[in-house]
Image: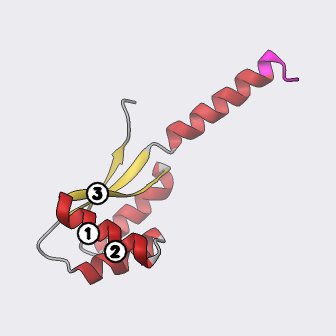
């Protein structure tokens, strides 16, 4: 049985963790990069498998943008920066109203 203090600490830890993971990398369609290049970048830098990368590239192409990765800001920022350095149109975005 947990004490009220332990329960409150556990709830706070869970909420903090969820808040930290409320970030995403959004990839935008462009007229410059090929499907193969986008897929290669998603596999190499986002650790997607080939099928996931192909599906994301298709959604980016047809919808104009697509969220390709979720997580903590501190982990996503270097990935997003690398995608941008490789010529892709990407942004790091906060999810939710916080």
Q: In this view, which residue lies farthest toward the top?
A: 4
Q: Are there few (<14), some (14-19), or many (20+) residues within 10 Å of tag 1?
A: some
The quarter of the displayed image where residue 18 is located: top right
Considering only order in the chain, which callout, 1 or 3, is on the residue closer to the N terminus? 1
The quarter of the displayed image where residue 77 is located: bottom left
Label 1–label 2 contact, CB within 8 A:
yes
Question: According to the image, label 3 marks what residue?
Answer: 66
- Please check the rendered image and state whether residue 3 is part of the magenta-colored stretch, yes or no: yes
Considering only order in the chain, which callout, 2 or 3, is on the residue closer to the N terminus? 2
Q: Classify 55 as above or below 19.
A: below
> In the depicted view, which residue is nearer to us: 59 or 29?
59
SS of the residue under disc 1: helix
The quarter of the displayed image where residue 5 is located: top right
| Numbered label attached to residue 58 | 1
Q: What is the C-alpha distance between the residues marked 1 and 2? A: 6 Å
Q: In this view, which residue lies farthest toward the left?
A: 31
The residue range painted magenta reads 1-5
| Residue that appears at 15% across and 68% down | 30
Please give left or right for residue 81 compared with residue 47 in the image. left
SS of the residue under disc 2: helix
Question: According to the image, label 2 marks what residue?
Answer: 54
């Amino acid at each position: 049985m947990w004490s009220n203090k332990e329960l409150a600490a556990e709830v706070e830890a869970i909420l903090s963790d969820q808040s930290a993971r409320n970030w995403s990398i959004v990839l935008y369609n462009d007229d410059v990069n090929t499907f193969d290049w986008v897929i290669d970048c998603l596999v190499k830098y986002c650790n997607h498998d080939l099928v996931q990368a192909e599906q994301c590239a298709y959604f980016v192409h047809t919808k104009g943008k697509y969220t390709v990765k979720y997580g903590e800001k501190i982990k996503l920022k270097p990935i997003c920066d690398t995608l941008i350095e490789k010529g892709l149109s990407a942004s790091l975005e906060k999810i939710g109203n916080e």
